[in-house]
Image (cartoon, grey):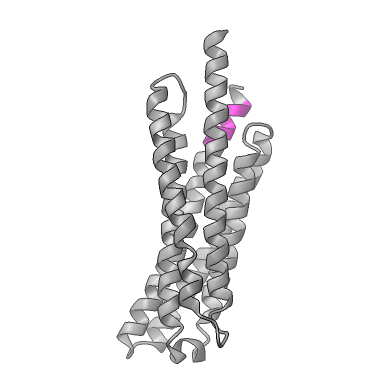
Amino acid sequence: MCAYNNESIAEMNIHENLVNLASIVEDALRIFNDVVNNLTKENVDLKKLYERILVPKNRVEENKIIFMEYLVRLGETIAYKQSYASIALGLERLAQYLDGASYRLVLLKKEDEFLNNDLYKYIDGLRKVINEQFNNLYQGLKKLRVEPKKTISLVNEISKLENRADEIYREATYTIYTKLSGKTLLLMMMRDVLDFMENSSDLLRSLGEELRYLALHKIIVG
């Protein structure tokens, strides 16, 4: 009975730490949204806005290290440790992707060609998909211990949304190579932004699958 209680406490701590990591990433995503929303506005210092994302990004990295150390100290006493570690590492990577995309958007702000070609709509479209995916992941993670069936339902939505992100990415890639064929630097920056965002969407789907595995364990094994 004592071993069971210790493992339950460990699982509760693990879950709390992962929810906390996701909460910090949500802060980074909120700043990323601000960067995108202000991209077409005049008299906005986008660089200062972008610099705010470094705070949650660094916090995620620091908290991830502490979390991984905690997992190591638990040894083999906790099941599915690799899935927990994968989610933590994935959340850290997501914050890094958002940082990379935001920085390049700051550079694109200076390019009138970017706005004139209406390429902004692809960025905004991918942003909306990533926000929906993340919200489903975050809510699914919160409900993992108490409503694992709801977690699976939310994970299913993440996968569907990733298909939408792929469609936007393919269309956007074709457009930038068509419209920006003679503007190498602009094309490269735009492609970087799209790649970071598409990678974010793919990553969220992968994190969702890790969450699905944990939820199935809760439902089937208990």
Quadrant assignment, res 121: bottom right
Residue 116 pos. (x, y %): 50, 92
Quadrant assignment, res 181: bottom left
Dominant secondary structure of the residues highlighted in magenta in the image? helix
57 w.r.t. 127: above or below: above
Determine the residue positioned at 42% across, 60% down: 97
Q: Residue furthest top?
A: 1
Say if the magenta span includes residue 151.
no
Judging depth in this view, the residue of 165 and 137 nearest the camera is 137
Quadrant assignment, res 103: bottom left
Determine the residue positioned at 60% across, 28% down: 218
169 w.r.t. 4: above or below: below
Determine the residue positioned at 45% across, 68% down: 51
Q: Quadrant of the N terminus?
A: top right
Bounds of the magenta segment: 212-219
Residue 119 pos. (x, y %): 50, 82
Residue 202 in view, yes or no: no
Residue 176 in view, yes or no: yes
Say if the magenta span includes residue 216.
yes
Residue 152 pos. (x, y %): 62, 41
172 w.r.t. 127: above or below: below
Residue 93 pos. (x, y %): 41, 53
- Numbered marks: total: 0
Q: Quadrant of the C terminus?
A: top right
